[in-house]
Image (cartoon, helix red, strand yellow):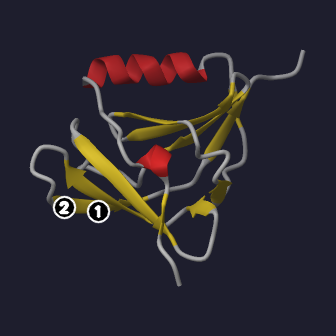
Amino acid sequence: MYRLLLAPLLLLTVAATDRDADQVEKALAGKVAGAPKNCLTRFEADNMSVHDGVLLFRVSSKLVYRNDMNQCSNLREDDIIQTNLFGSSQLCRGDIARLISRTGGFEHGACSFGDFVPYRTPAN
């Protein structure tokens, strides 16, 4: 077994709640939610942002995945999120993300990923 650290998931910051809600709304504007997926490939998980506990994985201008981190109340503005992939190149529902304090460098909690809901721009 080996440990693989997903670099895009390593350093993320969370902005103010109101601004975050606006950013999530803007990122998903004009897109339609599809059937949830259990896993994302490493390519799909490459561009991630955090918005008040909501993770957005931007694959392209027409496709964004939303993950609500199973109501992760421990996630703070200055946290580092660390995930480990064991024998897989996918990030999946139920995988654990460790929350590490950026200032102190200590782990203060963990959260699990929920479903990855695709939001796609409808074809015209």
Q: Quick one: 62 or 34, which is closer to the camera?
A: 62
Q: Which residue is mark 1?
A: 110
Q: In terms of image quadrants, where is residue 34? A: top right
- Residue name at image x 37 percent, y 57 percent: 82
Whether the residues at callouts 1 and 2 have beta carbons within 8 Å, the answer is yes
Quadrant for the C terminus in the image:
top right
Q: In terms of image quadrants, where is residue 52? A: top left
Mark 2 crowdedness (10 Å alpha carbons): few <14, some 14-19, many ≥20: some
Q: Quick one: 93 or 87, which is closer to the camera?
A: 87
Q: Which residue is mark 2?
A: 107
- Residue name at image x 64 percent, y 59 percent: 39
Mark 1 crowdedness (10 Å alpha carbons): few <14, some 14-19, many ≥20: some
Residue 94: x, y in percent? 49, 67
Residue depth check, mark 1 versus mark 2: number of the one nearer the observer: 2
Looking at the image, residue 36 sits to the left or right of residue 67; the answer is right
Looking at the image, residue 25 sits to the left or right of residue 80; the answer is right
Q: Residue furthest bottom?
A: 1
Looking at the picture, which amino acid does disc 2 mark?
Answer: Glu
Residue 64 appears in the picture as rendered: yes
Looking at the picture, which amino acid does disc 1 mark?
Answer: Ala
Q: In terms of image quadrants, where is residue 78? A: top left
Q: Residue furthest left?
A: 104
- Residue name at image x 59 percent, y 46 percent: 45
- Residue name at image x 15 percent, y 54 percent: 105
Mark sitting on residue 28: none
Residue 68 appears in the picture as rendered: no
Distance CA(mark 1)–CA(mark 2):
8 Å
Above or below, 24 relative to 80: above
SS at badge 1: strand
Residue 118: x, y in percent? 67, 40
